[in-house]
Image (cartoon, grey):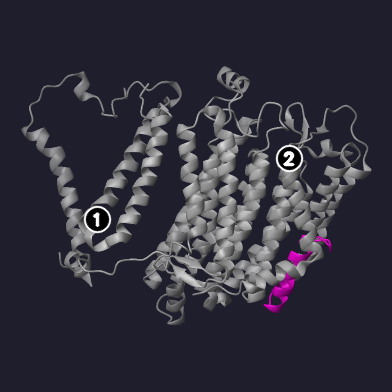
Amino acid sequence: MGEVYLPILVLGILGAAFAVFSVAAPSIIGPRRYNRARLDAYECGIDPTPQPIGGGRFPIKYYLTAMLFIVFDIEIVFLYPFAVAFDQLRLFGLIEMAVFIVTVLAVYAYVWRRGGLEWD
Amino acid sequence: MSSLLAAASFDVPTIEYGQLSPMLIIFGVAVLSLLVEAFAPRGSRRPIQLVLVFAGLAAAFAAVVMIRGTQHIAAMGSVAVDGPALFMQGAILVLAFIAALVMAERQVDPLGDAFAPRASALPGSTDEIAFTRLGWLQTEVWPLFLFSVGGMLLFPASADLLTMFVALEVVSLPLYIMAGLARRRRLLSQEAALKYFVLGAFSSAFFLYGTALFYGYAGSVDLSAISDALTANAGSMWLVITATGLVSVGLLFKIGAVPFHQWTPDVYQGSPTPVTGFMAACTKIAAFGALLRIMYVALGGIRWDWRPMMYVIAALTMIVGTLFALTQTDMKRMLAYSSIAQAGFMLVGVIATNQAGLSGTMVYLVAYGIATIGAFAIVTLVRDSTGEASHLSQWAGLGRKAPIVASAFALFLLAFAGIPLTSGFTGKFAVFTAGIAGGATPVVIIGLVASAVAAFFYVRVIVLMFFNEPTSDDGVSVVVPSGFTTLAITISVALTLVIGLVPQLILDLANQAGLFIR
């Protein structure tokens, strides 16, 4: 029973180790040249402090870009298994992937035509 | 690594495209409709969208008629194409057609249709005024509508809980946006959208957690596999009961049953009225279809365990819906509480857990849906200079100002009340007899008492319209609509009368639909 969950435990340990390593290694071996920008918290390019009154508002553009990223990210996630097994899936796989890609493309066309890809 | 190699040889999955054609048509048309938004010039979008929507709904209905009689679990066990599913799909398509007619109306509001000229413009801003003056329309409402209808077709046909969850989201996400698109009283509309979204997302999480627990119990999210696991008494009963409760919360929220009804009056009031009609009628059919399928197919074997819970919820829903409807002063809120009470009556059919309960609930859903869309269509017509005049006092003496419209509204109210010779009586009779046959007599008695109390507030509106003097110069008038709303109300009146006068037609149809397949 226990050994079924062993890979999950190993994965957890590896994940934790990677996180600790990524934080610890630069602080030990990296050069220490501090300036104001380096000491700032990193928040996707937004000025983190001082916060505007009322907490401030994020431009809706961030949301749009993040969502587009997720859409294409997920598309790739589905394309990988298809690429591995497309010959065994035969016509079924071709039809289903065509439907999937056409759907994503339609959304892409909508976003493009309605100015979703322009930053300003 | 071994699991990867084992996966190297597998059976190629199959999908029965013909049996899924109603959904495929609607989703296909929805994608086309999205492309129209992207490429068609602004002025020609509305006519193209209307052609697409009505042709798509008609084609999907034709597809449902073509595949009638199918009894098959399609798409590798995830979509059940059976009699009840096809009955509900047909009903959703007909009601969506009527709702689309009301949504297409552009004549009752001098500023345009029921939707904001540009949903992204701040309410009351100069942008909004400029867009209104240009006569812009937010035609994106049509692809949203179609995606939602597609989800509704899948919802009652889902044969596993995960497909059902995806369908639930496809139904809901477009509705959240549509609820916030009202042209008038935009802040109220946006508040409604936000409430609906937050509470809807919360209830989806309940559904998903219940699904996870069912998977933990049965090792599958398949409804028939859960039923088999229950027969084999596979594990902890507490797990099943918790899972049943959680999944029920998700579905009862969509149905608007007490105590998960809090969103209903606010959302029904704030949403653009044509959307409210669509949402109240079609979402309820889809969600009841899903609830019936889970309770009958997966949990039919343990009905003695979930029935007490449903007894309490059905009784509470009928009582709370009726009592709160009595105290409302706003027409849309009153109709919202009335829809809560109606959901309670329909739950009696769910509790019955027999074939009569299934077919009775389906008949009730159709009768209620038609009257609901018709009633909300009429709410869009009673207006003053600021938009819809939805306060009850503004409806006083409407029978003198516009006798035909007021009579139609009175007919829908009588149908809600379940007066004989209207569709509501057919539905109530079918559900209550099924409830007694299914051994749920105490709930039926509560239902009968609640119906009698409910009849009071429906009749009160009729009295208000026909026997009260109109308040002088309050500026309320009944607007003459274009052919769209006229046709919608005419169809609703005709169907309400037909189902009431010749109930055998729809009762036979619902009985022929038979039971869910496993």
Depth check, front residue: B300 or B127: B127
Left or right: B420 with respect to B367?
right
Q: Which residue is mark 2?
A: B483
For label 2, count other residues whose C-alpha is less than 10 Å away and answer few (under 14), some (14-19) or many (20+). some
Q: Chain ID for label 2?
A: B
Question: Residue at the spot x=21%, y=19% of the render?
Answer: A36
Q: Quadrant of residue B39?
A: top left
Q: Which residue is mark 1?
A: A81
For label 1, count other residues whose C-alpha is less than 10 Å away and answer few (under 14), some (14-19) or many (20+). few
Residue A38 rendering spot, x and y as whole percentages: 19, 23
Q: Amino acid at mark 2?
A: Gly
Left or right: B120 with respect to B417?
left
Secondary structure state at the residue bearing disc 2: helix
Q: Is residue B193 visible?
A: no
Residue B107 rendering spot, x and y as whole percentages: 71, 32
* Marks 1 and 2 belong to one chain: no
Q: How many numbered markers are drawn?
A: 2
Task: Please state the extent of the stretch shown in magenta in the rendering.
Answer: B418-443
Depth check, front residue: B215 or B467: B467
Residue B173 rendering spot, x and y as whole percentages: 50, 45
Q: Amino acid at mark 1?
A: Pro
